[in-house]
Amino acid sequence: MPNYSKMHESSGHLAHLIDLFMFKGAPENHDADHPVTVLVNHGYVAGFAPSRNQPLWSAYRVAHADEAVDYDRPHFYYADERIGESARLSKDTFGKHDGIGYHVGHMVPNEVINVQFGRLAQLETFFMTNMCPQRGSLNTGVWLKLENAIRNIKDTTGQKDHMWVIVGPVFGADPDHIERDDGKMVPIPEAFYCVSVDPFRYPYDTPGAVEIACFLIPQNAPAGSSPSDYLASLSEIEAATKLKFMPGWDATVPRSAPRSPSRSRGAATQVNRLLAQF
């Protein structure tokens, strides 16, 4: 199928970083109605859809550090000047729609990029090209629990601590829109997805040597719920988003996610370190 994605001209000199932040390649976008422009930053990569005024995917990589920098949270959001004016969102917040408050929801969280890649990379997570309208109850509830669990991944015996993550919105067939002060109409996602890849044995880039955990979390998810309440399969997320993840793998990639923290692998039991936190 055609891939309706292109590299933004300003990111060409950073294209070599994509493989550092993404496991087995950037997602292929099979949605001809919503082409993706790939924006490479110093700590993450975003697939921005001008027709949606927001990213369809944002990807990052996490590794535990015994010591890490910890810069203060920036005060402001930033319009991304790489994007043409017609699709560029100002730094203004989203406000309310039908009485419901919507946060400027980070897809790649600033906290994890802060400790992994430093100040400039953290500031770049505040570009509006990394943001979606996200209900406040979700942004500070179960979505935050998932972000924190990813950030807290640590080494286990004989296992490296790297984890690759792709997150983004899911839209309904006829989404509601938030009107901005400048008249731009921004569609509201009905849900958000997260795909995590956690290699656990050598060779680390083979399908049988990774744990994949996928989540599909609706905007109205109760704040007290757990990410494990919203486990999904990779196939479900691909169908909902028209994206193909990890295209560098062949058809043997596991497209069903584990439904429990551990599963038997012959004589051994493999623990999914992300699910084990819930």
Image (cartoon, helix red, strand yellow):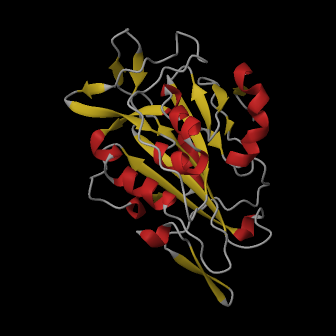
On the question of residue 29 being in view, the answer is: yes
Q: Residue at position x 55%, y 69% from top?
A: 154
Q: How many marks?
A: 0
* Residue furthest bottom as drawn: 267
Query: Quadrant of the image for the N terminus?
Result: top right
Tell me: residue 166, above or below residue 229: above
On the question of residue 232 being in view, the answer is: no
Instruction: Tell which of 82 and 205 is nearer to you.
Output: 82
Percent x, y for residue 190? 39, 38
Query: Quadrant of the image for the C terminus?
Result: bottom left
Percent x, y for residue 234? 59, 54
Name the side, left or right, on which 109 lies relative to 45.
left
Instruction: Tell which of 60 and 246 is nearer to you.
Output: 60
Name the side, left or right, on which 264 lies relative to 185.
right
Percent x, y for residue 274? 51, 66
Q: Residue at position x 49%, y 20% from top?
A: 79
Q: Quadrant of residue 55?
A: top right
Tell me: residue 236, above or below residue 126: below
Q: Residue at position x 38%, y 51% from top?
A: 144
Q: Residue at position x 35%, y 61% from top?
A: 226
Name the side, left or right, on which 66 lies relative to 91.
right
Tell me: residue 260, above or below residue 165: below
Tell me: residue 103, above or below residue 227: above
Percent x, y for residue 259? 50, 69
